[in-house]
Amino acid sequence: MTVSIPGVMAERTCPTVEAAGRTLWATLRALPLGWDQAEAYRVLLHDPGLMEMHLARGPQRLAFTLDGRTREVHLAITV
């Protein structure tokens, strides 16, 4: 599984969905996100079943704003 946050975190390959969630959360929790947005990411990234459900529909892109620019979290299952 690959994860990235262009402009914030380079693409990384993780062996499991759970590891991908931990990797993304380690970066996102350090960013100045609003409480609602940080909590939404925390809930998603700490629930591998929920992440797998979203990824079953294909690669996911989750947007947030940082320093006045829209950024995207990219999640994809790689084969």
Image (cartoon, rainbow, N blue to C red):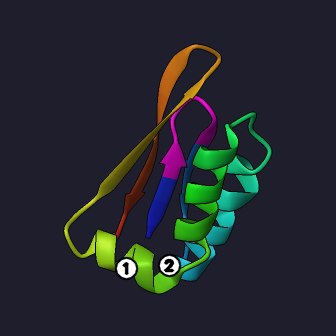
Q: Residue 47: horizontal and vertical position, in percent?
A: 54, 80
Residue 34 among magenta residues? no
Extreme residue toward the top, this view: 68
- Residue 73, compared with residue 60, is above or below; it is above
Q: Secondary structure at mark 2?
A: helix
Q: Residue 30's quadrant in the figure? A: top right
Of 33 and 79, the residue lying toward us: 33
What's the residue at 22%, 64% (across, down)? 58
- 34 displayed left or right of 58: right
What's the residue type where badge 2 is placed? Answer: Val
Of 66 and 7, the residue lying toward us: 66
**Residue that numbered label 2 is attached to:** 17
Q: Residue 33: horizontal and vertical position, in percent?
A: 68, 37
- 54 displayed left or right of 2: left
| Residue 35 visible, this orientation | yes
Which segment is the magenta one? Answer: 4-9
What's the residue type where badge 1 is placed? Answer: Glu
Of 10 and 61, the residue lying toward us: 61
Residue 8 among magenta residues? yes
Q: Residue 31: horizontal and vertical position, in percent?
A: 74, 38
Extreme residue toward the bottom, this view: 49
- Residue 52 is marked as 1
| Mark 2 crowd level (few <14, some 14–19, many ≥20, 10 Å Cα) | many
What's the residue at 50%, 82% (across, down)? 48
Label 2 near label 1: C-beta < 8 Å?
A: yes
Q: Residue 71: horizontal and vertical position, in percent?
A: 49, 30
Image quadrant holding the C terminus, namely: bottom left
Name which of mark 1 and mark 2 comes first in the sequence: 2
What's the residue at 52%, 68% (across, down)? 44
Kindly report the distance in space between the C-alpha atoms of the residues bearing marks 1 and 2.
Answer: 7 Å
